[in-house]
């Protein structure tokens, strides 16, 4: 689990900045990878942080898609 509030804010900021169409059309694996890549372009992460963040994002894919869908309306 990701416990760092700055990391959580950055993660959700990246998700909000990502076009809804991308969030809705990518596979779960591609979605998680895309968000992780965007985050790692902004900050340096340890292997442990990448793993924790991957698991966190993966557990939130349905919520991410629901949010993206609501932005399209």
Image: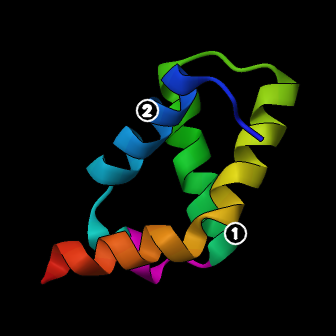
How many numbered discs, if any?
Answer: 2
| CA neighbours of label 1 inside 10 A, class few (<14), some (14 to 19), many (20+) | few
Real-space Cα separation, disc 2 to disc 1, in angstroms: 21 Å
Closest to the observer: 39 or 6? 6
Q: Which mark is residue 29?
A: 1
- 43 shown above or below 63: above
4 falls in the magenta region: no
Residue 1 lies left or right of residue 44; in this view the side is: right
Q: Which residue is mark 2?
A: 9
Label 2 or label 1, whichever lies nearer to me, is: 2
**Residue 53 picture quarter:** top right
Which colour style is shown? rainbow
| CA neighbours of label 2 inside 10 A, class few (<14), some (14 to 19), many (20+) | few
Give the image location of residue 61, x and y in percent. 58, 70
Quadrant of the rendering where the N terminus is positioned: top right
Is label 1 in a helix, a strand or a loop? helix
Give me the residue at 49% from left, 40% from top.
11
Give me the residue at 41% from left, 79% from top.
24
Give the image location of residue 34, x and y in percent. 55, 54
**Residue 9 picture quarter:** top left
Quadrant of the rendering where the C terminus is positioned: bottom left
**Residue 19 picture quarter:** bottom left
Q: Of helix, strand and loop, which mostly describes the magenta segment?
A: helix
Q: Which residues are magenta?
A: 23-27
Give me the residue at 69% from left, 62% from top.
58
Q: Earlier in the sequence, mark 2 or mark 1?
A: 2
Q: Residue furthest top?
A: 44
């Amino acid at each position: 689990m990701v416990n760092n509030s700055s990391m959580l804010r950055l993660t959700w900021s990246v998700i909000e900045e990502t076009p809804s169409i991308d969030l809705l059309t990518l596979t779960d694996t591609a979605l998680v990878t895309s968000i992780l890549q965007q985050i790692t372009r902004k900050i340096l992460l340890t292997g442990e942080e990448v793993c924790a963040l991957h698991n966190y994002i993966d557990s939130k894919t349905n919520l991410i898609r629901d949010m993206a869908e609501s932005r399209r309306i």
